[in-house]
Amino acid sequence: MAVKEMRAGREVPAATGGLRTLAPIDQAPDEDAREAPAGMKRYWLGTLDQCPLQNATIGGRTFHRRTDKGYHVEGERMPRKIERRGALEWLTDEQVAKIKDASRRKFVRRVGDSARVVQPRPGAPRYASDDPIGMYLYCIPVEDAMRLLGAGWHDAGSPPSLLSAGATAIA
């Protein structure tokens, strides 16, 4: 006889061989509230609305304008999505330093109706349309985002950019 577990109100074979009960995903604890891995801190990062790019990869991390989080509602066949500003990631101090360093060296270059991230060679001329990428990105510890933006911080207002005076993450 196979050991079973409850998943979203249905019995399914247990992968671990133990008997346990799982709450439906829409009632499960928020994944953002889990304990921090050793040496890491939770950051909220993304591109600001005025950024000409939807996503940008800087310092090995992708900064998204919006991300979707899926959840299941019992009795419905299709999962629902919640669209959120940016993304939450666990980062080490070294990863944050890498983002900070890369944001100083990269620019958003606008050419006509398009834009792209460029890293000019040392001594290469810059175009008048080049903007520092840091003015379009944010990377804020979650605790600071809660303090700066208050309740509903994840979708409230506009977070400070990496270059703004109010940015607390990588000043």
Image (cartoon, grey):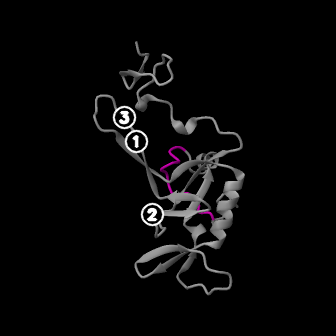
Count neighbours of disc 3 (C-alpha within 10 A) and say few if under 14, some if 14 to 19, many if 20 or more.
some
Stretch of the chain drawn in magenta: 151-162
- Side of 145 where 4 appears, left or right: left
Residue identifier under label 3: 72
Residue identifier under label 2: 54
For residue 22, which quarter of the picture?
top left
Looking at the magenta stretch, what is its main secondary structure? Answer: loop
Q: Residue at x 34, y 41 (%)?
A: 80
Q: Amino acid at mark 1?
A: Gly
Vertical placement of residue 18 versus 114, above or below? above
Q: Amino acid at mark 3?
A: His
- Side of 28 where 97 appears, left or right: right
158 part of magenta stretch = yes
> SS for tag 1?
strand
Q: Dividing the image into 4 quarters, which one contains the C terminus?
A: bottom right
Q: Residue at x 42, y 31 (%)?
A: 25
Q: Residue 95's x, y, as percent?
A: 67, 55
Q: Residue at x 50, y 45 (%)?
A: 152
Q: Of residues 119 and 44, which is closer to you in this image?
A: 119
Q: Of residues 161 and 26, which is closer to you in this image?
A: 26
Tell me, yes or no, whether the two marked residues, 2 and 3, touch with CB atoms within 8 Å: no
